[in-house]
Image (spheres, helix red, strand yellow):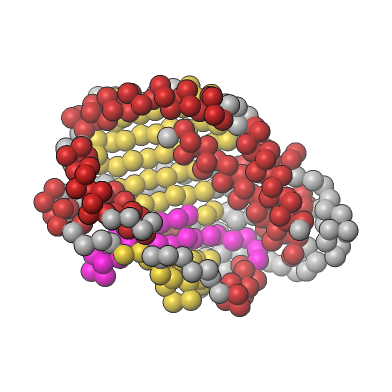
């Protein structure tokens, strides 16, 4: 979990720096107008079960000291100040969503970007060059579309393995949840998975198959361990924020039945010491906090404080800046 939080925050840092690439290209053009503010909610469907939403803007002031004030003209056709151009071209929101669809036998994937500027250029370049082939992932149509400014979408799907629907029918009531879950907002990174219909298993099975492994074999090996717990897990939420270059905070919350929650605390507790020790010894990252069952809230909650990440962020930024200038 530590590594996951760290990776997500580093990816967020890289996303901020990724705007430098678009900004350097667009700095030579004038008269670009900002797009409307569009939310990922306009793209989500009633079948959406997984959300990963990134809000890059709050990270920019933290990373700005690492961004050079100029990329010299010996590296680009003209000298460019990335600090001047990155903010107007930074996406307002990026969201990855997944929606299992047993009618088609596929999990539909959508990457939504509320681009501020540069959306039509990104679309044109992507259509000219074509999207890369990804094993077990099928692009929907041309794969990328811009139905309106501020609403850039990449769409794809991956197959749901045979046998998953039968497992869900045996262990979950397949009725639509009374109320959809929603991203709360206010965080740099927020992830949420709705498991009220067992879609954690559905999406995990699709990912396992997409990586070239046999879901049926893995499920057969693990079902006695996971199936007593999985139906009692209602939803999983993770929020994470970069506080400064060397510190991040994260909150993991798993809403579950008491039996599943207590079992999860026991299983995670056994591994937590090794996770924390490994983060310190391998990555120089210190994690404070641990997952604890809160009976009043009906949730397993871990309030985490993560430090020692500055070197990882600096390396990520340096690598991205080198790519922008090449």
Which residue occupies 56% across, 30% down?
283
- Residues 222 and 88: in front is 222
Is 113 inside the magenta-drawn segment?
yes
For the C terminus, the image quarter is bottom right
Q: Main secondary structure of the magenta part?
A: strand
Q: Which residue corresponds to the image point at 40% horizontal and 62% vertical from the top-left?
A: 109
Image location (x, y in percent) of residue 134: 46, 65
Over which residues does the magenta segment extend? 95-118
* Horizontal and vertical percent position of residue 173: 14, 51
Q: Position of residue 184 (x, y in %)?
A: 42, 43
Is 176 inside the magenta-drawn segment? no
Q: Residue 87: percent from the left, percent from the top? A: 69, 52
In the image: residue 264, left or right of residue 252: left
**Relative to residue 89, is residue 319 depicted above or below?**
above
Instruction: Tell me if I can see residue 89 in this picture.
Output: yes
Q: Residue at x 49, y 66 (%)?
A: 153
**Residue closest to the eye, 279 or 308:** 279
User: For the N terminus, which image quadrant?
Assistant: top left
């Amino acid at each position: 979990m530590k590594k996951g939080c760290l990776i997500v925050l580093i990816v967020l840092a890289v996303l901020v720096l990724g705007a430098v690439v678009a900004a350097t290209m667009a700095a030579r053009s004038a008269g670009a107008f900002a797009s409307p503010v569009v939310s990922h909610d306009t793209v989500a469907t009633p079948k959406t079960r997984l959300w990963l939403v990134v809000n890059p803007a709050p990270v920019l002031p933290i990373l700005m000291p690492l961004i050079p004030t100029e990329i010299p003209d010996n590296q680009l056709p003209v000298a460019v100040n990335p600090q001047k151009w990155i903010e107007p071209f930074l996406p307002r929101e990026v969201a990855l969503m997944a929606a299992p669809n047993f009618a088609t036998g596929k999990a539909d994937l959508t990457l939504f970007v509320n681009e501020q500027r540069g959306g039509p250029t990104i679309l044109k370049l992507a259509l000219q060059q074509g999207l890369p082939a990804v094993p077990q992932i099928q692009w929907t149509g041309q794969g990328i579309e811009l139905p309106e400014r501020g609403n850039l979408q990449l769409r794809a799907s991956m197959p749901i393995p045979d046998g998953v629907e039968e497992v869900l029918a045996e262990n979950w009531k397949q009725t639509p949840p009374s109320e959809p879950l929603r991203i709360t907002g206010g965080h740099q990174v927020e992830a949420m998975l709705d498991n009220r219909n067992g879609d954690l298993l559905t999406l995990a099975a699709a990912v396992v198959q997409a990586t070239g492994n046999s879901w049926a074999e893995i499920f057969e090996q693990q079902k006695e361990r996971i199936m007593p717990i999985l139906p009692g897990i209602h939803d999983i939420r993770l929020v994470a924020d970069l506080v400064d270059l060397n510190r991040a905070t994260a909150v993991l919350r798993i809403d579950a039945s008491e039996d599943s929650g207590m079992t999860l605390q026991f299983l995670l507790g056994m591994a937590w010491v090794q996770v924390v020790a490994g983060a310190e010894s391998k990555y120089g990252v210190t994690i404070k906090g641990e997952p604890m069952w809160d009976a009043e809230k009906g949730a397993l909650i871990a309030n985490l404080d993560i430090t020692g990440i500055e070197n990882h962020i600096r390396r990520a930024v340096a690598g991205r800046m080198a790519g922008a200038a090449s």
